[in-house]
Image (cartoon, grey):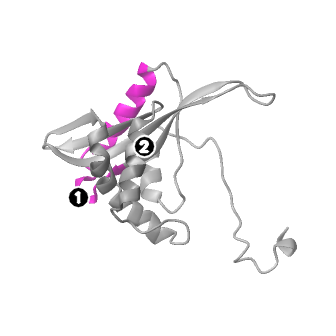
Amino acid sequence: MTVTIRTATSADARVLARLNGPVQALHAQAQPDVFKPAAMTPELVAHYEAELARPDVVIFIAEADGEPVGNAVAVIVERPETPFAYARRYVLLDQITVNPEAQRRGIGTALMAAVLGLARELGIGNVRLDVYDFNQEALAFYTRQGFHTYNYRLEIDLSAAEDVDAMG
């Protein structure tokens, strides 16, 4: 199997929408109250068309033997200085997916290398990402890639709590 990583073009919106299916299905299964079911819709294609047109977004596509099998969406984030924090610049790995049948073959690692390479090329020393707690397989992958926890996000589901005031 020959794996290549290329930068997506405006012609790749439908390919990206299709590649999104398995990871969207995983999210929808784990949290159906938050994530919509996976579906190839005109809105999804339009979303990727818009992402591909943004100057602060770079999308990589992984191909195995010429067939698209995964992608990574990198967003260059620039935060201005505030009274609370210094100005900072980082790459946000917004999405990464590899088709289930192509996993565990180094494709995710190759996509990650492309994102890290982009950050280095731009002189950016920090790459961040979010991962849901239910996605332990992805968390393990990110840990193997050298990522570490830098922040915690917590939530409380008020619809599930009988008496939130009593919990505090």
Tell me residue 164's x, y (percent).
81, 73
Q: CA gap, disc 2 to disc 1?
A: 28 Å
Which is closer to the viewer, label 2 or label 1?
A: 2
Side (left or right) of 56 relative to 108: right
Residue toward you, 2 or 7 = 7
Asked whether the viewer can see residue 145, the reply is no
Badge 2 amino acid: Ala
Give the class, few, some or many, for how many residues have Cα within 10 Å of label 1's Cα (few <14, many ≥20).
few
Identify the residue at horizontal 37%, vertical 44% (top origin): 49
Q: Which residues are magenta?
A: 97-121
The quarter of the rendered structure image containing the N terminus is: top left
Residue toward you, 57 or 104 = 57
The quarter of the rendered structure image containing the C terminus is: bottom right
User: Do the numbered discs 2 and 1 sit on residues whose CB atoms are within 8 Å?
Assistant: no
**Residue 86 versus residue 35 in the image, above or below:** above
Magenta stretch contains residue 109? yes
Asked whether the viewer can see residue 27, the reply is yes
For the stretch drawn in magenta, the main secondary structure is helix
Side (left or right) of 79 relative to 119: right
Identify the residue at horizontal 62%, vertical 41% (top origin): 150
Identify the image quadrant of residue 11: top left
Q: Which label number is shown at residue 50?
A: 2
Residue position marked by numbered label 1 in the rendering: 101
